[in-house]
Image (spheres, grey):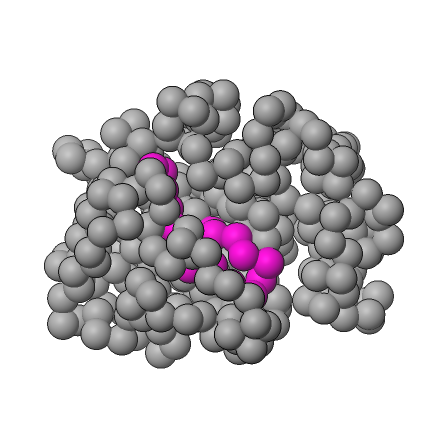
Amino acid sequence: MMIRSTTGWLLAGIGALVVGTALAARPTAGEPRAGFQQRGERMEWRERGLGRYASARVSGTVVYGSHPRQQVDLYMPDNPMGEATLVFYIHGGGWSRGNHRMVDAKPAHFTAQGHVFASAGYRVLPDAPVEQQAADLGAALRAVRAQAEDYGFDPARIVLMGHSAGAHLAALVATDPQFAGDAFGAIRGVVLIDGGGYDIALALTMPEMEAPLIYRDVFGTDPARHKALSPLTHVGGRDAPQWLMLHVAERAATTRQAGSFAAALTKAGRSATIVPLAGTNHMRINREIGTDAGSAQTQAIDAFLARAVKP
């Protein structure tokens, strides 16, 4: 089932969230995520709602399943031309938290560049293992692509973007066609932001990995599952043709993962560019996209989008 609503508004900062009746099932900004309180963690303000730099209007929401997380917010440029690129963003959160409202300045920036921006929600642990998370995102991509005419983007011009765990999921969806199905061929490019899980077996054994227990808890101990859920495993098939990998220059783990993944893509004939960024951290590299503070990553992404969507 797909429902479109044009009544949602995202206000500046972490202000009020006003939602129309068609979105009554949407979780409120302060609602705990599934499994979050079980871990005894403190919910940070960034994960309650919109993020420090948020200032944009939701143009509509596509609901692609019955779970409250199975929805995608879309943001349109002021003058949609019907030929825009769809930038399809996947939030991070260690495969167990985060939400699709964590967009910061991205919608305002990318719509100002003439793109349509989508922020995808998906089920997380403990409700859904990683396999189902990737399946959710594939279903979300197909559902949004079916609305291309209404939202003014070209259904054959899609760029996936993901941060942290979202980078792993974006890479998996863009290398393993089983998830996106008939939407797979429309993925023209992929932007990965400080991901550390392109090779799961490597992530579990890297001495420089800051939190290896997260990977053990999420991916278990079965080598066959590690292989199936590693984007690196699927390189050499129908991979997306253009890739951009941004990572914190001082983070050894994401530096190594990006290097090995980009090398495999290049060997398979794909275009893969790595941009290390100094003087930032794992959260800021993503949060500051579209702001003056994040000019380096913003310029790299803008240049990539212009290149990746050429006919």
Q: Is residue 29 above or below residue 151?
A: below
> Which residue is depicted at the point 76% across and 36% down?
252
Q: Classify the position of the C terminus by image quarter.
A: top left
**Residue 73 at least partly seen:** yes
Q: Is residue 196 above or below residue 24?
A: above
Image-based side of 6 in relation to 201, left or right: left
Location of residue 298 by image quarter: top left
Residue 125 picture location, percent across and down:
57, 71
Q: Is residue 270 above or below residue 16?
A: above
Q: Residue 234: within the magenta?
A: no
Between 86 and 89, the one nearer to me in the picture: 89
Residue 140 picture location, percent across and down:
40, 61
- In this rendering, the count of numbered labels is 0
> Which residue is depicted at the point 33% across and 38% down?
53
Q: Classify the position of the N terminus by image quarter.
A: bottom left
Between 276 and 305, the one nearer to me in the picture: 276
Residue 288 picture location, percent across and down:
43, 33
Image-based side of 131 in relation to 123, left or right: right
Q: Residue 100: within the magenta?
A: yes
> Which residue is depicted at the point 28% across and 50% down?
14
Image-based side of 125 in relation to 90, left or right: right
**Residue 264 at least partly seen:** no
Q: Main secondary structure of the magenta part?
A: loop
Residue 29 picture location, percent across and down:
31, 63
> Which residue is depicted at the point 52% across and 34% down?
285
Q: Which residues are magenta?
A: 90-106
Q: Is residue 66 above or below residue 189?
A: below
Between 268 and 135, the one nearer to me in the picture: 135
